[in-house]
Image (cartoon, coloured by chain):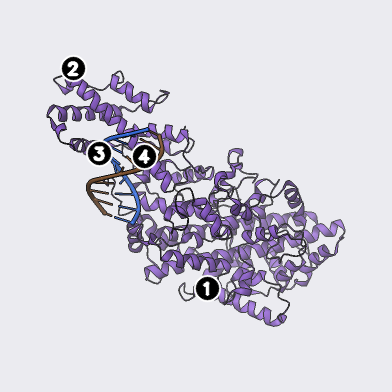
Chain colours: A purple, B blue, C brown
Amino acid sequence: MNLTPPDQSIHKPNEGCLEDNKTDLMLPCFRRSMYEEPLSSYHNGSLISHLLRKTIHNKRPALNNSHLYLPSTSVSGAGLVPESGSTMAESAHEDRSSMSSKDSLGESASPGGPASAERMSVEPERPLSEHLQAKRARVENIIRGMAGSPSNRSHGEVEGAEGETCRYSAEVYKESKRKRKLPQHQDHSHSAVLTPTGSPNTSKDEECHKLREQLQSMQRLLRQLQEKFLQMYDHSNLESEEKGEGDVQEDINEPQLDSSTSSDNKRLANKDRMKVDGGYLSSERDQKSLQEMLKCELSRAVSESVDMVFRKLSMTLQSQSPQPQVCQSPEYTSVEKRGQQACASELSDCEDVSKPKPLEYYESTPVASPEHQTEALSLVVRKPSLNQLSSLSQQVKRPYPLHQTPFQFSYSAPLHDSQILEHLLKFGPHANFAGIPCLPPSLDRSSPDSLDLPWESIAMRSKVSSGHLGQHHRPGALGQVSIDSLCLPHVKMECGDLQSMAERSTFMSLNIQEGLTPNHLKKAKLMFFYTRYPSSNVLKTFFPDVKFNRCITSQLIKWFSNFREFYYIQMEKFARQAIVDGVSDVKDMAVTRDSELFRALNMHYNKANDFQVPDRFLEVAEITLHEFYNAISLNKDSDPSWKKAIYKVICKLDSDVPEEFKSPSYL
DNA sequence: CTGTGACCTG
DNA sequence: CAGGTCACAG
């Protein structure tokens, strides 16, 4: 019985949005000509874009070398080839936490992705010039690809190892039956979302890839900037501290080696606002100013660009056919490294792990719950020891590792802004921000369940939900849980929808449940006062803190089925009683709060009696009672399916569940 | 085949 | 309330 036909316009909200944002999606540096724009034409965060643009355009040996100088004791060096100090666990750790995989360059037939092109700086066997040339070619290729047509680039061209995994998964799941899982959704997306190439299937894929690549590029650029910033920071600190160890000394040498390239960019960027003399900063005050400015610029750039990409990506995901999008997400790395085993183990609660997973799988995959955190997961996400954490926080002096797991952010003390940025970029706007000082305590500490919640889980949830939401759909509400919700400075509120903002902030605080709790049951019972036949979409909407999968959905539906059962049994019972009692007129069968029938129902659904049952429920109950009374009176109950007519009436009497119920902390 | 609802049972 | 079964719709 399809009581709530899908709203054909569920994706309409995105339609215009997507088009409108298409050009905004790119960073200014990508959107515009790469080499011609004068600095003055940049506004707001565009300055940093210019900076980034120049940075990417300039050669990078110094940047790359800086990785080499990173001491191997760093918690998780960016692209650092595990050296003697790194244990295997750490390697796995940093593998997972790296946006790019360092194998990508070496193993991929095609040149490595943008990130790997830079991180893979350790290739002693290759002549340096050739290596650099190759890198440069790749980078330029990337830039061309981003500035040019979205469709003129093959996927593998700029993908790292995660791309490999993505393609693998894509192939695997293309064959799966999931294709037919959401036909409506698919149709909608195809009809509603225009794509650059006009070829819906492939172009969406490509667009998704493109977006991910853009995001990666931006992340990469930001990392570079952060590195430069930290190098400067490091340099100044060490200068005042008197340098000691050799590796650190190498660190501070780097900016000087690079003084004609990237650091020039920084100076260029600083020139307008700061007085920077000759080489580096002359005073601590200037240095702090520079830090502040860089933070601002970074934040602004992030808020402007990343948000756009996230939003665009989210929309693309929503509008895309049910491909294995989890791996197309820019943050897939955090999941992919877990390997199939971990994914499987997380889903093993419900389904045969060898089977292709329905969409719910992707929706729920990234959430780690204690009971499902098998060893496979623990291989991936290791909570660093307190020692590590403290040492981490003491490491800000050097160009600290830029690739850290969420856990590392979860318990460390004051965070660097760039750590937040990195975290944001790395794990997406929905990642766990526990430990970020600016968040209120309630948001600060997520339970372990949500510690490893990459943003694609939300994106997927958004996708899935929006596919079913119908009239409840709010454009990108969940998928756009974004850095808007963070307290980063200069965060731009692009989506003015207050409701969605509220939901975002709500969502940020969600502690996604693996299973249904007694509170959920209680909430469901109260919801029954409003809706007897909630669609699974409604259930998803009103249990946002529940990690929906097939089992959970079925269980919730089963609950309501049981509620109905009890409800109808009571109705029939009281209707028959009324007939036995000789009630001749249905008007004498009013259902009030004093009625025995109501008390029975209230006892069942509202045992604590702490909920004000809506009058509408009394009306519906009365109507139901009358229906039963009439049917029985007319001897319709001789028909085995006599109740069905009643069900048909009652199912139309559902009313909307109040918004308050959407709050995960409603009870 | 899958999702859903009703019904029955424990 | 959950499990199982059956029927039905898409």
User: Which numbered mark, 2 or 1, is in the foreground of this view?
Assistant: 2
Which residue has dot 2 on it?
A: A581
Q: Are marks 2 and 3 in contact (CB under 8 Å)?
A: no
User: Which numbered mark, 4 or 1, is in the foreground of this view?
Assistant: 4
* Mark 3 Cα shell of 10 Å, populated few (<14), some (14-19), many (≥20): some
Quadrant housing residue A661: top left
* First of labels 4, 3 by sequence position: 4
Q: Are marks 2 and 3 on the same chain?
A: yes
**What residue type is disc 4 on?**
Lys
**What residue type is disc 2 on?**
Asp
Q: State the residue lying farthest toward the left.
A: A634
Which residue has dot 3 on it?
A: A652
**What residue type is disc 1 on?**
Gly
User: Which numbered mark, 4 or 3, is in the foreground of this view?
Assistant: 4
Q: Secondary structure at mark 2?
A: loop
What percent of the width, then of the height, locates residue A652? 25, 39
Q: Are marks 1 and 3 in contact (CB under 8 Å)?
A: no
Residue A347, compared with residue A190, is above or below; it is: above
Q: Chain of mark 3?
A: A
Residue A80, compared with residue A619, is above or below; it is: below
* Mark 2 Cα shell of 10 Å, populated few (<14), some (14-19), many (≥20): few
Which residue has dot 4 on it?
A: A558
